[in-house]
Image (cartoon, rainbow, N blue to C red):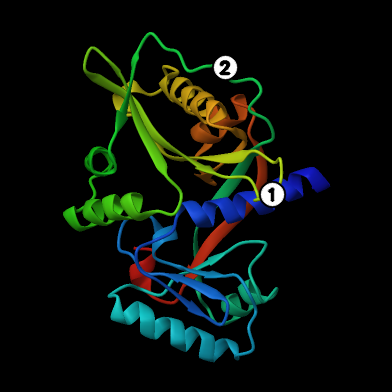
Amino acid sequence: MSPELDALARRAELAGLNAASAPREAQVEGWLLRLSPGKAKRSRCVNPLAGGSLPLEELLRRCRVSFEQAGLPLILRLTPFSQPDDLDDRLAAMHWHRFDPADVMVLPSLDGFGEPGSSERLTPLSAADYAALIGALRRSSVEEITGHARRLEEASVRHQAFKLERDGVLLACGQVAIDPGPAGTSVGGMAGLFDIFTPEDQRGRGHGHQLCAALLAQARLQGATTAYLQVGAENDAAQRLYARLGFLQAYRYHYRSDDPRAWT
């Protein structure tokens, strides 16, 4: 990986953590615990950000107590930046199940995206309305929809949600969250694309590409200069879509748990 791509990857990881902040969080020896129910595992998992001084077994025990109190299975999110460095290997040796790999992709420049314009109707949505829309499309439970809305409303980075319509028919929907550049520098913001969704009967018609291009144009107008997103490692259609927009593979992460509820 080139130094430039590595720097973008590291910034995307931090931006993604900021954008996925949850109403219920805790810290254990440098590990970030997110304890909010919902479909998105990034809001109900452990992010091992620092090694700390406690033995691994004690770290896991303390995390498990917090997740049990929240009524959630204990899940760890493993990235190339997780600490300690051998954490994934040690969990594998303990027979923790590996599941749901995902790729983080980055876009080094938004220069190719102009002002948003479309013959269709790009409609902004409130956090509650978007959570209800995407929840219905994904058949989420009432608890999951409510939790999603709360996370969006309380996130430390503002999420802007939109739907793309034609004659009242939903073509695609999604969100953009812009992480500001480092304070005291001239580095621009980094835009994250989230929850990009095209209804099944509208797929293969370019609506997802059109929506993403419009979201990136919005982000550029608001000072973003780069972008990132997270996509399932096995979602070939979405991977091709994002590659056409100029996104590059940065790194892959996955989850581990010893609780079957986490992956079933």
Can residue 197 be seen in the rendering of this structure? no
Can residue 124 be seen in the rendering of this structure? yes
**Residue carrying label 1:** 184
Q: Residues within 10 Å of mark 1 (few under 14, many from 20)?
A: few
Distance between mark 1 and mark 2 Cα atoms: 27 Å
| Residue type marked 2 | Gly
Q: Residues within 10 Å of mark 2 (few under 14, many from 20)?
A: some
Query: Which quadrant of the figure has residue 40?
Result: bottom left
* Residue for point 30% across, 63% down: 37
In the image, residue 86 above or below residue 232: below
Query: Which quadrant of the figure has residue 228?
Result: top right
Q: Earlier in the sequence, mark 1 or mark 2?
A: 2
**Residue carrying label 2:** 114
* Residue for point 59% across, 47% down: 104
Percent x, y of residue 249: 66, 42
Image-based side of 65 in relation to 81, left or right? left
Q: Nearer the viewer, residue 110 or 100?
A: 110
Percent x, y of residue 1: 79, 47
Percent x, y of residue 134: 28, 40
Query: Which quadrant of the figure has residue 240?
Result: top right
Give the residue at the far left of this rendering: 142
| Residue type marked 1 | Gly
Give the residue at the far right of this rendering: 2
Which mark, by number, is residue 117? none
In the image, residue 128 above or below residue 254: above
- Disc 2 element: loop
